[in-house]
Amino acid sequence: MAKGYWVARVDVDDPERYKAYIAANDEPFKKYGARFLVRAGRFENPEGSSRTRNVVIEFPSYQAALDCWHSPEYQKAMELRLPPVSAIDLVIIEGYDGPQP
């Protein structure tokens, strides 16, 4: 079964209030088996647009990634990061298990 991923690009406009979102998302992320692969590290943006913070979260399955986002726990946490606290582009995507080059 292919894993699922959240790929997010974020601009944080109120870092102090954003900390409450980070604390609140801990519960749903643990519940759905989330694992951070990228969490706001250094980056270059050689093409296209960008935001100031990038995140990639791995889930055990695509369904778990969807279920986490739709969960009441995450929806409650998400309210803490809505504008004016932050702006986000989020894609929930199924991983690839096929042949590699």
Image (tube, rainbow, N blue to C red):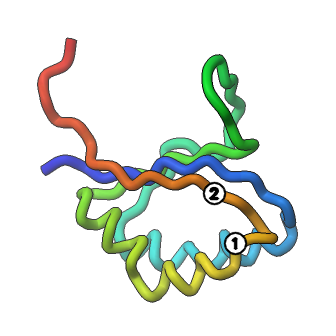
Identify the residue shown where x is 42% and y is 71%.
Answer: 69
In screen coordinates, is 19 left or right of 50?
Answer: right
- Please state which amino acid type lies under the numbered disc 1: Arg
Q: Residue furthest front?
A: 48
- Disc ID at residue 81: 1
x and y percentages locating residue 76 in the rendered image: 56, 86
The residue lying toward the viewer, choosing from 80 and 22, is: 80
C-alpha gap between disc 1 and disc 2 = 9 Å
Q: Answer yes or no: do the residues labelled 1 and 2 have beta carbons within 8 Å?
A: yes
Identify the residue shown where x is 51% and y is 82%.
Answer: 75
Quadrant position of residue 99: top left
Identify the residue shown where x is 75% and y is 43%.
Answer: 52
- Disc ID at residue 88: 2
In screen coordinates, is 44 left or right of 97?
Answer: right
54 shown above or below 66: above
* Quadrant position of the C terminus in the picture: top left
